Image (spheres, helix red, strand yellow):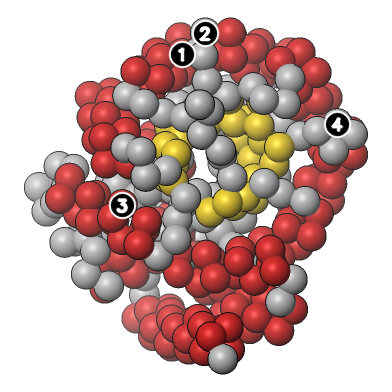
């Protein structure tokens, strides 16, 4: 039976030990905690530092997450690469490892024309027996995927084969354009880290793929959106947005630095080591503001829990 791909599906971060090797003990702790707080599965993607891993490490990470997730939820493997052949190889391995779907960004090293982007995703879809999530990560890396390419892929392969994670700015209007151009058939996932989740949910998304660092709050927000609890929605959304705005100031490095700081601070990761090279690290003043906002976030989550149980 096909597993439902929907709801809160966070991107797992790759923990490293001080010697720069993958910390699989912390990885398992992250997955177990994620399910405890309400995740419906896990993905790998840009904030898993996939592009900074060796081939063997990417394969090992996929194997480990496939085994750790098991039958508790869905596992979606990030397979984007610089060549079609690489992406297909990663995707076929993910299928063997038990993935429910694969997700890919287009190549980053070349300014790929629309026809080549279409061919890249077409060949990927034709060579794996899993749904393919077309990820446009151009809000922070790469270039936008033209709307006509996305619509063409959906028309060719159908709504059960091709899903979407649009992150090109402006996210909300682009999401609506894709929804409308496909007559509402496109299955779309929010990938804004939470900052645009309220807007995206109102436009109609099947789920959200945030990082792990604010997961209890994102789960609570998703549930509030499903039950249309307007007071809870904004109580949770405001501190999430304030926190993600700190991450956005430094792009992908901003997300990685803050995500790993929070997971290490909360005892899930042994270290906050990131793969070199990177262009930005937390300075003391940003860290202080981050800590203040994390308190506000915890207060919001507890407030919503109390209101829901009373």
Q: Kindly identify which residue carries mark 1.
A: 88
- Identified at 76% across, 13% down, the residue is 156
Rounded to the nearest angstrom, the CA distance separating label 3 from label 1 is 26 Å
Name the residue nearer the viewer: 139 or 131.
131
Marked residue nearer the N-terminal end (2 or 1)? 1
Q: Kindly identify which residue carries mark 3.
A: 31
Rounded to the nearest angstrom, the CA distance separating label 2 from label 1 is 7 Å
Disc 1 element: helix
Marked residue nearer the N-terminal end (4 or 3)? 3
Contact (Cβ within 8 Å) of mark 2 with mark 4: no
Disc 3 element: helix
Contact (Cβ within 8 Å) of mark 2 with mark 1: yes
Marked residue nearer the N-terminal end (4 or 1)? 1
Q: Is residue 289 in view?
A: no
Q: From what the image shows, is residue 32 above or below residue 99?
A: below
Q: Kindly identify which residue carries mark 2.
A: 127
Q: Which mark is residue 182?
A: 4
Name the residue nearer the viewer: 287 or 26.
26
């Amino acid at each position: 039976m096909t597993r439902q791909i929907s709801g809160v599906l966070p991107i797992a971060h790759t923990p490293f030990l001080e010697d720069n090797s993958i910390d699989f003990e912390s990885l398992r702790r992250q997955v177990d905690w994620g399910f405890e707080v309400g995740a419906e599965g896990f993905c790998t993607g840009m904030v898993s530092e996939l592009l900074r891993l060796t081939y063997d490490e990417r394969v090992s990470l996929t194997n480990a997450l496939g085994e750790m997730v098991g039958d508790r939820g869905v596992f979606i493997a990030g397979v984007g690469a610089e060549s079609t052949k690489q992406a297909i190889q990663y995707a076929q391995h993910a299928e063997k490892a038990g993935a429910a779907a694969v997700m890919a960004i287009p190549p980053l090293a070349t300014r790929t024309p629309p026809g080549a982007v279409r061919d890249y995703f077409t060949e990927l879809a034709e060579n794996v027996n899993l749904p393919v999530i077309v990820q446009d990560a151009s809000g922070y890396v790469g270039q936008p995927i033209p709307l006509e390419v996305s619509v063409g892929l959906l028309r060719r392969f159908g709504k059960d084969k091709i899903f979407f994670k649009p992150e090109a700015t402006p996210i909300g209007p682009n999401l609506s354009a894709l929804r409308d151009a496909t007559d509402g058939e496109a299955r779309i996932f929010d990938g804004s880290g939470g900052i645009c989740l309220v807007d995206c949910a109102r436009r109609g998304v099947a789920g959200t793929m945030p990082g792990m660092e604010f997961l209890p709050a994102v789960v609570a927000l998703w549930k509030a959106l499903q039950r249309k609890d307007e007071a809870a929605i904004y109580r949770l959304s405001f501190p999430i947005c304030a926190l993600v705005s700190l991450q956005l100031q430094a792009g992908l490095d901003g997300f990685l630095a803050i995500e790993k700081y929070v997971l290490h601070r909360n005892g899930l990761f042994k270290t906050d080591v990131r793969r070199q090279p990177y262009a930005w690290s937390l300075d003391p003043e940003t860290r202080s503001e981050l800590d203040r906002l994390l308190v506000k976030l915890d207060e919001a989550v507890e407030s919503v829990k109390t209101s829901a149980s009373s």
